[in-house]
Image: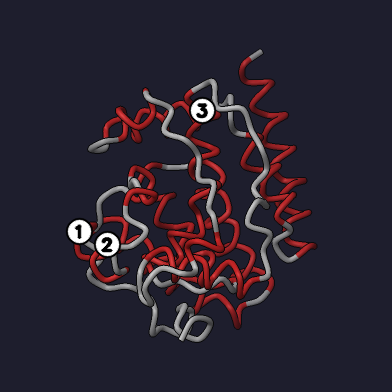
Amino acid sequence: MGRFNEVLRALNNLKLLAAIGRSGGDLASIADLVDSFIDSPQMADCIRRFRATPGGAELMDQRYPPLQPDIARLSQLPSGSLGERYARLITSLGYDPEFFRPRPTDSEAQWLTQRIATTHDIHHVVCGFGTERQGENGVLAVTAAQIGFPAYVLLTSAGQLASFRFQIERFEAISDAVCHGQAIARQAACLAAARWEEGWEKPVSQWRSELGIRDPADAKAYGLAAQLP
């Protein structure tokens, strides 16, 4: 029965990947893909890896609240601070600050899924990846490599494969961004275990220093500098 369920999950994932590809990254389809792994063996292993990171088990056991940003307040923080840069990114993208899909956080899998989903755009800021296709693959690669978050592993793999097969002109840039994200993952502390809400006022440069991000992607072709100069 377990193997049959995994076959069904794989078929459903293929359908979701196709929907994401057709839509150019529809957030609802991505959220569906993320949710499809909540009760999977892959998510169980992701939880194991997260709990093994410094501070991960403590965050999970206390069910540290998923991010609920006050964009108006954050935008008033000093220029260059994490809060100000994050608020500027959300505003520039035209996102509703409460666009995150609401999920229960009772189980470890539900909590970790929601925590990663709600803090994803902070990773763009601290790692310096833009939000276009290449930058998105790069930032997803960080969490995929650090803790094996299932949907991000699948998305980065599928992104490279799809460009190699159907859009070869994009393959080099996407591969470069993914390799950059994997390099950051090896250098840095686990981003999923960071307590961002306790340091909104800190400069992004200080966060990078504390986390061990020595080569952010800002100035790359897939970097964030073009969006947030």
Amino acid on which the number 1 mark rests in the picture: Glu
Location of residue 170 with respect to 75 vertically, above or below: below
Image quarter in which the N terminus is found: top right
Q: Nearer the viewer, residue 132 or 93?
A: 93
Q: Nearer the viewer, mark 3 or mark 2?
A: 2
Q: CA distance from mark 3 to mark 2?
A: 27 Å
Residue 146 location, x and y as percent? 35, 47
Mark 1: which secondary structure?
Answer: helix
Q: Nearer the viewer, residue 215 or 141?
A: 215
Amino acid on which the number 2 mark rests in the picture: Trp
Residue 184 location, x and y as percent? 30, 62
Q: Nearer the viewer, residue 175 or 53?
A: 53
Residue at 52% from the left image edge and 72% from the top image edge: 88
Residue at 31% from the left image edge and 56% from the top image edge: 185
Mark 2: which secondary structure?
Answer: helix
Dot 3 or dot 2: first in sequence order is 3
Location of residue 67 with respect to 121 vertically, above or below: above
Dot 1 or dot 3: first in sequence order is 3
Is disc 2 in contact with disc 1, using a CB cutoff of under 8 Å? yes
Badge 3: few (under 14), some or many (20 or more) residues near its Cα, within 10 Å?
Answer: many
Residue under label 3: 109
Residue 70 location, x and y as percent? 54, 55
Q: CA distance from mark 1 to mark 3?
A: 27 Å
Q: Residue furthest top?
A: 1
**Looking at the rendered structure, which numbered label has been put on residue 207?**
2
Mark 3: which secondary structure?
Answer: helix
Location of residue 136 with respect to 10 vertically, above or below: below
**Looking at the rendered structure, which numbered label has been put on residue 210?**
1
Residue 81 location, x and y as percent? 35, 69
Badge 2: few (under 14), some or many (20 or more) residues near its Cα, within 10 Å?
Answer: some
Is disc 3 in contact with disc 2, using a CB cutoff of under 8 Å? no
